[in-house]
Amino acid sequence: MEIKLFEQLELSTDLKKAIIDMGFEKTTPIQGMAIPHVLEGKDIIAQAPTGTGKTCAFGIPAIEKIDIASQMPQVLVLCPTRELALQISRELKKLCKYKRNINILPIYGGESIERQITALKRKPQIIVGTPGRVMDHIRRKTLKLQEIKTLVLDEADEMLNMGFREDIDIILETIPQDKQFILFSATLPKAILDIANKYQKESAVRISATPKTITVPTIEQFYLDVYEDKKTEVLSRLIDANHFKLMLIFCNTKRKVDDLYKELLLRGYRIDALHGDMKQMQRDSVMNKFRKGLVDILIATDVAARGIDVDDVEAVFNYDIPSEQEYYVHRIGRTGRANRKGVAYSLISGKEIYKLREIERYTKTKIQKISPPSMEDIKENKIKSIIDEIKVEISKENTSKYLGYVDNLINEISADKNITSYEITAAFLSKSINNLTIGSSSKVRSDELEVNRDKGMINDKRYARLFINLGSKDKLQTAQLLKLIINNTSVKQKEMGKLDMLEKFSFFEVPKYHVEDVIESLKTKKFKGRKINIEVANKKNR
Ligand code: ADP
Ligand code: MG
């Protein structure tokens, strides 16, 4: 069997201890297959999709073989992007936790070359770099490769797609012939096999960790058939009806990423966007916020999302269906990593269903159709999370200072009605749940909404104008009407738009996502015995 216990592998205690600290017990299949061969010194050509644990597959044996006495670069890892270089370095550093004398240096374009030259003088034994920048250092003679014992090409197909073929050839020619050459690639097109044939030893071992069904079995896949202009609403409901920690949303174009980002920000989600044309520093800062849980949702295009590596992504949303089937696999592969559970939702409108069917054939999986969550589902979820929060409060055992209030409340109400704490708890629950609207669950940030409004970021398209049959003739002040709206709906004072009071009726503006709730909540109310009539203002009554 390809999966082994790390305990069974012939590794030094230092490394085993670090692996235990990282929380790994069993190898992934690719690790189980590759590590013994790499330790033996064999060349490897391995096909494996993302999330299969390739970094440790080459990292563990490569670290094991480092000669600490020598201070020349001994391992060179080439990978396509700066993010990957940083990610791989991070993972390797964790593996070296108990090997203090091993230095790892990532080098990539976009960072000052002087800084890298200084860092190279500190004699790192492991270099993780992008081909362009590695070439640069070779030309400047600031990186010496004569002692390289292990060369790794990670995501080789991606590097070729990005036009690094020539750089890779030159680097391969520069490195000593007798090195060990490890090649990892998600796909094995002819160009990759050519490189393998040209530069690998005949004894090279070919490994494939491509699962029979291409997608990872721990990912549940669903699709929803919706109108294009309802996608954002349905997406919000999916987010609110579940309890996902970190989420990724994919759009096909930058434009859509931008629009959706603003839309969701307005709805109060903690969200950020990744762009292909972002400066590296900005990308890093976004990724860091995401990793630290300071934002819950990240929106990106396929290109911009390259190199995202976060383990706890619990859900991936395809706002639209990707143009390439392979992208679908890549997208949903961002969740369910390292055998965690993951969910993927695709929003399909109109003809996109044909693309979805193609994806099903390509991945040999059935993507299950579901309906959008209802308000009831969302309420249900909200109640559950409130109850969870209450349980946490109780476990903290610091509720005592509120007990007095509860006593008073019971005494007060029991005077004319026999009320129990049981009913009071239910009343609290009912009160908290009444404040519910889509997109403003626990993640609401109306302060942000306000700030954005001040900056004029919201154009009026995001607000809806409502008609209500109450006016100055009803002996009503503007402030009273405002209070009526705010007290009976989930609209907050600072979210209110314009309010125009006329004699017999009034108009007021609220963010569009509150409209349903405002109408539902107010139409059952009465004012001075008269039934309230409320509706979206149309041209006629405007
Ligand atoms: P790939 O390069 O194939 O996309 P990575 O090397 O980035 O995959 O690994 C994906 C994630 O799985 C990483 O966060 C890594 O820490 C984790 N991982 C790697 N090996 C194991 C293992 N044996 N058990 C559990 N998690 C692992
Ligand atoms: Mg990788």
Image (tube, helix red, strand yellow):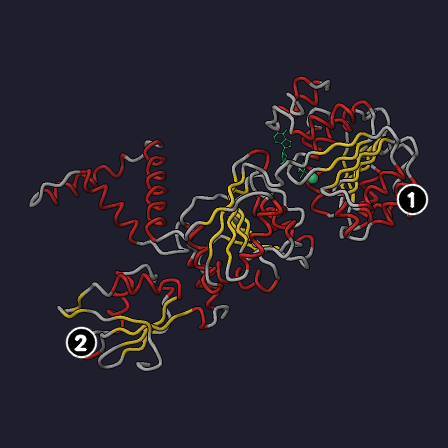
Ligand 2's image quarter is top right
Q: Quadrant of the C terminus?
A: bottom left
362 with respect to 509 (left or right)? right
Q: Nearer the viewer, residue 148 or 250?
A: 250
| Secondary structure category for the residue under label 2 | helix
| Residue picked out by circle 1 | 141
Q: Residues within 10 Å of mark 2 (few under 14, many from 20)?
A: few
448 with respect to 157 (left or right)? left
Image quadrant where residue 487 sits: bottom left
Q: Which mark is residue 328?
A: none
Q: Is residue 67 above or below residue 50?
A: above
Q: Residues within 10 Å of mark 1 (few under 14, many from 20)?
A: few
Where is residue 107 shown, x and y percent of the image? 78, 44
Q: Which mark is residue 474?
A: 2
| Secondary structure category for the residue under label 1 | loop
Q: How many marks?
A: 2
Where is residue 58 shown, x and y percent of the image? 75, 31
Q: Nearer the viewer, residue 354 or 385?
A: 354
Where is residue 497 shown, x and y percent of the image? 37, 70
Given the image, on which type of amino acid does mark 1 rest? Answer: Lys
Q: Is residue 85 above or below residue 477?
A: above
First in sequence, mark 2 or 1: give its number.
Answer: 1
12 with respect to 253 (left or right)? right
Given the image, on which type of amino acid does mark 2 rest? Answer: Asp
Ligand 1 within 8 Å, label 2 CB: no
